[in-house]
Image (cartoon, rainbow, N blue to C red):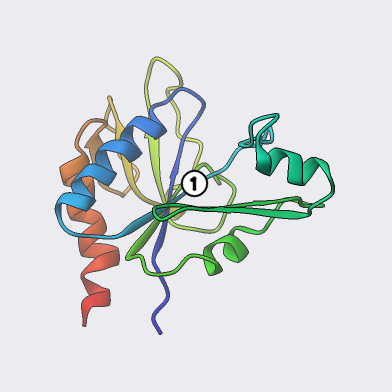
Amino acid sequence: MRSIPVLSIVGTSNSGKTTLIEKMLKELKTRGYQVATIKHDIHGIDVDKPGKDTWRHAKAGADVVVIASPVKLVFIEKLADEPDLDAIIARIKNVDLVLTEGYKNGNKPKIEVCRVAIRSELITPPEQLVAIASDICFNVGVPCFDINDATGLVDLVEEKFLKPQAT
């Protein structure tokens, strides 16, 4: 079984990471790919709604709560420590690509999103970059795309991560 390629979309806060991922997802889906996303949140999350059944289950002591429907499956798991990205990826099946948002200190290949109004320098060492999406051009030895060029970025992702896997 082949491993699923993983690509991290990184950048500073408000640089446009989520917007770029949305555009890339639309383009990847148009091309027929199955894609998973993982969002890193350093602040902690709470997806459950107080008073709902799953919230009540967790409040009563469940360590893992699963809610299942004909179209979605959600696991809510209490953790002692932040999970390793590779452990999260290992749980994902039946996709062609995993895009992560964040994980700027992780060991996955990265596309950095950089808006000059937010920050004029890159936060990622060039050797970790696959590409840059920006409103200015950086000459660091990797392709630099316009921040809105999801089609060009997906062309690159296909070439580097998806097409080689097809053989």
The image quarter containing residue 9 is: top left
Residue 93: % across, % down: 44, 69
Pick the front one: 98 or 55: 55
Say which quadrant the C terminus sits in. Answer: bottom left
Residue 144: % across, % down: 26, 40
Q: Is residue 38 above or below residue 138?
A: below
Q: Is residue 81 above or below residue 24?
A: below
Which residue type does callout 1 highlight? Pro
- Position of 2 with respect to 87 (left or right) is left
Residue 41: % across, % down: 61, 37
Q: Is residue 25 above or below residue 128?
A: above
Instruction: Identify the element where label 1 is drawn.
Output: loop
Residue under label 1: 125
Is residue 138 at least partly visible in the picture?
no
| Residue drawn at point x = 42 percent, y = 75 percent | 3
At label 1, counting other C-alpha atoms closer than 10 Å, the crowd grade (few under 14, some 14-19, many 20 or more) is: few
- Position of 32 with respect to 160 (left or right) is left
Count every numbered label the image shows and give the total.
1
| Residue drawn at point x = 32 percent, y = 65 percent | 96
Say which quadrant the N terminus sits in. Answer: bottom left
- Position of 15 with respect to 40 (left or right) is left
Is residue 42 at least partly visible in the picture?
yes
Farthest residue in the top direction? 117
Q: Is residue 95 above or below residue 17?
A: below
| Residue drawn at point x = 41 percent, y = 56 percent | 70
The image quarter containing residue 161 is: bottom left
Residue 31: % across, % down: 15, 56
- Position of 51 with respect to 21 (left or right) is right
| Residue drawn at point x = 47 percent, y = 53 percent | 69
